[in-house]
Image (tube, grey):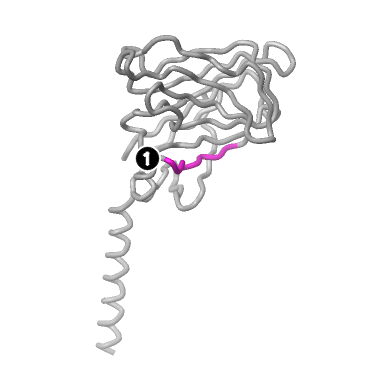
Amino acid sequence: MEILFLLLTLVGCASLQASQVTDTDAMRYDVSLTINGEATDWQTLAPAQRDGDMLVVDAAQLADVDTPVTLSFAGGQVDLRLADVSEWQYSHVLGTRWLETSPSTYTVHATVRHFDQGWDNYANIFQVVPVGDAGSVDNGVRELLHPHDNEQPFTRSQANVSASGQVRVESADNVEGWGGSTIVLDVDALEFPFDLAWQLTPQ
């Protein structure tokens, strides 16, 4: 009986240590994902996990800027490039607002964050592009003509965007290029006006 108790105690300690290692190797973020100012439900894909309103991400994912962590919601998803979310060396789309001006034609606003450093390194474009064959876009490119060192994040718009199906809102800078967080939407499933924003708070 004493041997059995000792074995159970050792197994319990090993499990506790494994749990502590997992906690040590994970980063937790409080997630704010809103549509038209209201909190919206979201899910994530393995190996990231959801714990209440928290996103739990393994440290290995945080080191890989090429692999996004996805938050999915009704009507689309946010692809987070967490490896750069505190540095902003890439240009990230933090939100997007769509106004329908005529059938299938929109004014699209994008809220962008990037560590602008004058003309040598600044976010210089955002665009709406189709996702494969699932969407179509015309006139979706907005060039950003100057740095925004003292205006971060900043919002700019592109009028007369024709879009349908699945599209991606993305931004780039003049040094690193594409690679920041993006937002994917199924335009045909949205109600307008549509205003989405996300924010992560490390815990």
Q: Is residue 169 left or right of residue 13?
A: right
- Looking at the rendered image, the quarter that the C terminus falls into is top left
Q: Which amino acid does label 1 sit on?
A: Tyr
Residue 94: horizontal and vertical position, in percent? Answer: 45, 26
- Is residue 67 highlighted in magenta? yes
Q: What secondary structure predominates along the stretch shown in magenta? A: strand
The correct choice, above or below, for 198 with respect to 138 in the image is: below
The correct choice, above or below, for 31 with respect to 88 in the image is: below
Q: In this view, does 119 lie to the left or right of 52?
A: left
Q: Which of the two residues, 176 or 170, is positioned nearer the viewer here?
A: 176
Q: Which of the two residues, 84 or 117, is positioned nearer the viewer here?
A: 117
Residue 178: horizontal and vertical position, in percent? Answer: 46, 29
Q: Is residue 136 left or right of residue 26?
A: right
Residue 24: horizontal and vertical position, in percent? Answer: 28, 53
The correct choice, above or below, for 81 with respect to 108 in the image is: below
Q: Mark 1 points at which residue?
A: 29
Q: In the picture, residue 52 is in which quadrant? A: top left
Q: In this view, does 25 lie to the left or right of 190?
A: left
Residue 80: horizontal and vertical position, in percent? Answer: 45, 36
Residue depicted at 32% across the width and 17% down the height: 120
The residue segment tinted magenta is: 66-73
